[in-house]
Image: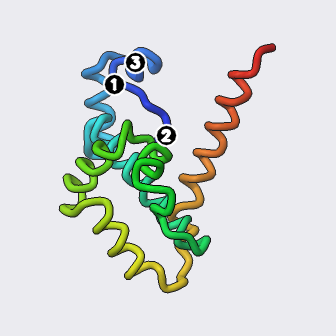
Amino acid sequence: MPWIGCDVRSLAADLGVSDRQLRRRCRDAVGMAPKELHRMLRFQGFLALAQHALASGRTPAANGLAVLAADAGYTDQAHLSHECRRLTGVTPRVFLDETMRSCGCGHDHAASYAPILRHRTDVRSLQARSAVPA
């Protein structure tokens, strides 16, 4: 998921397959390599956070793009900017402005962002529980 940083080698080891086998299986299943899939999922996480903010009557980057980038799983704002330009052709600010213009009219996007954000909450609560000393 977008919020969980993971490299392909450790994922392959966790699954008990080789790096090459993981790449092959991922390409067969979803049409792209694991890292490409992770990039797409992370960007979908960014979009889910933006849509959730709009649905809640807030501006997506009200706390700054750096905070939004970190919340979406990017290492920093520059990382988000690079990925956003690569995937959409525009900067995150332009992308969010266009999103606010086209999706800020009150229609509900909960079906697209709720499952992603729900999983994020589940992951964070599991991480918090595992960080508490026994």
Percent coordinates x, y for residue 20 in the rendering: 25, 22
In the rendered image, the quadrant that contains the C terminus is top right
Q: Which residue is mark 3?
A: 10
| Gap between marks 2 and 1 measured at Cα | 15 Å
Report the disc number at residue 29. Answer: none
Question: In this rendering, would 106 be left or right of 37?
Answer: right
| Gap between marks 1 and 3 measured at Cα | 6 Å
Image vertical order of residue 89 relative to residue 19, above or below: below
Q: Earlier in the sequence, mark 2 or mark 1?
A: 2
Q: Name the kind of residue labelled 3 in the image.
A: Ser
Instruction: Please name the residue shown 43% across and 60% down the image.
Output: 47
Alpha-carbon neighbours of circle 1 within 10 Å: few (<14), some, or many (≥20)?
A: some
Secondary element at image label 2 = loop
Percent coordinates x, y for residue 31 in the rendering: 26, 46
Image vertical order of residue 86 relative to residue 127, above or below: below
* Residue placed most toward the observer, 133 or 9: 133
Q: Name the kind of residue labelled 2 in the image.
A: Trp
* Residue placed most toward the observer, 78 or 73: 78
Residue 78 occupies which quadrant of the picture?
top left
Q: Earlier in the sequence, mark 3 or mark 2?
A: 2
Report the disc number at residue 3. Answer: 2
Percent coordinates x, y for residue 76 in the rendering: 36, 40
Q: Which residue is mark 1?
A: 8
Question: In this rendering, would 35 be left or right of 51?
Answer: left
